[in-house]
Amino acid sequence: MQYELIDIGANLAHDSFDDDREAMMQRAAAAGVTTMIVTGSSDASNQRAAALAEAHPGTLYSTAGVHPHHAADYSDASDALIRSLVENPVVVAVGECGLDYFRNFSPRDAQLDAFRRQLDIAKDTGLPVFLHQRDAHDDFVEILESTLPDISRAVAHCFTGEHESLREYLAMGLYIGITGWICDERRGRHLHDIVDVIPDDRLLIETDAPYLLPRTIRPKPKTRRNEPMHLPEVLRVVAEARGQSEEHVAKVTTENARRFFNLPPSG
């Protein structure tokens, strides 16, 4: 059985798709993935993501932001570029932005500054925020708590945390994005036990392609590159863990994605 799905986070501007991007999109459509949000994460990828969305109206939309890994490069020009891009109707969220203390590819002060400045853009524009957090929970929550009252909507993209942080994010009003991490028997088993805590109206699903290929796919794909056609596997595992039908989870996550990103109705 096939369902209409929306992939809320796919890095389709990534160079691993340069040789077969159109074929990849056709495979996604054949799997029922009718709409994809192309994640922007740097000055260059923001421009590529918006260009892809413009070239595929109604199928692709994009975000514009600077990932914490690139926060050291965040400049007044970066800020101006995001502010310019979000004027384009194909750009439907600010981000990917947030904090990542796991790798610290950018100094923490730079991450904090870039995060705050992007939240200001979301406040000024009314657009939702596509959030990243890894090993930075306390600072992340502290910044968001003072900002969220002035922000329309926010999603914790690729949630991989524990029960306590999930409840905290939900209490703050965040939507929760679940990826193929839940399909990883080594790292994602805990998500099976807590994903049912997420209310129907706050659940979103995503691939984070080309990363996080679901390890439960059978037969095993020949390549480790993930792509949106594998979103139905995330749906299957999420539905199973929640004790709900795939049809129900497909319906609510698609409705949630349309509401979150203010997308037009299907058809």
Image: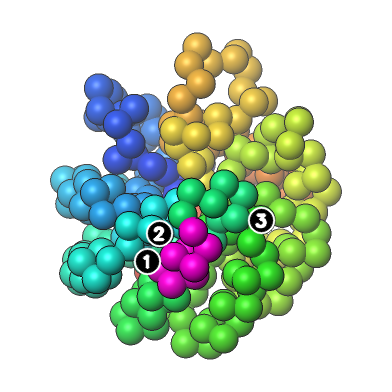
Q: Distance from label 1 to label 3 (Cα)? A: 21 Å
Is 108 colored magenta in this rendering?
yes
Q: What residue type is labelled 3?
A: Asp
Q: Which amino acid does label 2 sit on?
A: Ala
In the depicted view, which residue is nearer to us: 164 or 254?
164
Of discs 1 and 2, which sits in the foreground?
Answer: 2
Residue 175 image position (x, y, % from top left)? 58, 66
Specify whether residue 23 is in view.
Answer: yes
According to the picture, the residue beneath numbered tag 2 turns out to be 71
Of discs 1 and 3, which sits in the foreground?
Answer: 3
Provide the residue span drawn in magenta.
107-115
In the depicted view, which residue is nearer to us: 210 or 260?
210
Residue 173 image position (x, y, % from top left)? 62, 76
Mark nearer the N terminus (3 vs 2): 2
Give me the disc on residue 94: 1
Placement of 191 over or under 63, stated as above or below? above
Task: Report which quarter residue 180 is drawn in.
Answer: top right
In the depicted view, which residue is nearer to us: 106 or 66?
106
Report if the CB atoms under discs 1 and 3 are less than 8 Å apart. Answer: no
Residue 154 image position (x, y, % from top left)? 51, 70
Callout 2: few (<14), some (14-19), or many (20+) C-alpha neighbours within 10 Å?
A: many
Residue at image position (68%, 70%) is 138
Q: Is residue 151 left or right of residue 126?
A: right
Residue 199 image position (x, y, % from top left)? 70, 65
Is 180 colored magenta in this rendering?
no
Q: What element carries label 3?
A: loop
Residue at image position (72%, 54%) is 161
In the depicted view, which residue is nearer to us: 185 or 139?
139
Q: What element carries label 1?
A: strand
Q: Is residue 179 left or right of residue 112?
A: right
Q: Distance from label 1 to label 2 (Cα)? A: 14 Å
According to the picture, the residue beneath numbered tag 3 turns out to be 135
